[in-house]
Image (cartoon, helix red, strand yellow):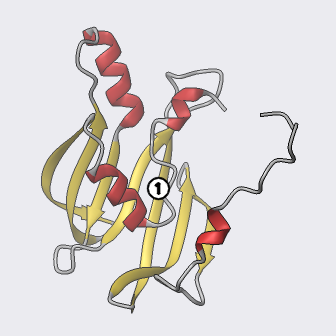
Amino acid sequence: MATYNCVVDASWFFPTLALQGLSSDPTLGAIDLGPAEWNGVSAIHLQFSHVLPGQTAAATAQLQGLSTLDLYLDPQTLLPLALDFNAHPDNNVNVNIPVEIQFGSYRTVNGVQVPFRVQKLFQGTLQLDIFVSQVAINSGVSTSLFTLPQLPSGGAQ
């Protein structure tokens, strides 16, 4: 995969993770594009893109184009309805392939609104349709899952 296809956050499948990443990135600029219509319903349209100081105008424009992410929120709940971004062929950074992630069927789990349906459209064609049956939040993951095993003595470091 070409590096330029890694500019958009990979956590698109779960909007809470995507939004958390967006909120903590100092190179990310945000624009409130105001009320919009998305899929026939009212939405709030936000647009995000990366900006790195000290770059040439051409490099800045290219990075902004590669990293642009459009977020559509429900105006009443402020829950994400969709994320739109472009993918690119590995051999041509200048070709935009529209990708849309749609979120729906929100339910409250331990005080957190979670989409129980996530769909991924590639060039307007449904490629992935995820139906979530169960979600556990803060369920007590053991810290031992994050412990690396000891290397045998004399082993490679």
- Quadrant of the image for the N terminus? top right
Which residue is situated farthest in the front direction here?
Answer: 153
Q: Is residue 151 left or right of residue 123?
A: right
> Pointer 1: what residue?
100
Q: Position of residue 68 (x, y in %)?
A: 34, 39
In this view, the residue in front, 27 or 153, is 153
Q: In percent of the image, x 29 and y 19: which residue is there?
A: 60
Task: Give the side of residue 152 with respect to residue 29, left or right.
Answer: right
- Quadrant of the drawing holding the C terminus: top right
Please give the count of numbered marks on the rendered protein.
1
The residue that appears at 65% across and 21% down in the rendered structure is 91
Q: On the image, which quarter does residue 127 sit in?
A: bottom right
- On screen, residue 73 above or below 114: above
**Residue located at (32% from left, 68% from top):** 80
**On screen, residue 27 above or below 134:** above
* 106 horizontally vs 130: left or right: left
In the rendered view, would you say 149 is above or below 7? below
Circle 1: residue type: Glu
State the image coordinates of residue 52 (x, y, percent, origin top left). Answer: 28, 23
Considering depth in this image, is 43 or 13 the residue closer to the camera? 13
- Residue 135 in the image: state x and y as whole percent: 53, 86
Tag 1 secondary structure: strand
Residue at x-position 38% and y-position 35%: 67
Task: Please say if 52 is above or below 8.
Answer: above
How crowded pointer 1 is (Cα within 10 Å; few <14, some 14-19, many 20+) is rated as: many
Q: In which quarter of the image is residue 134?
A: bottom right
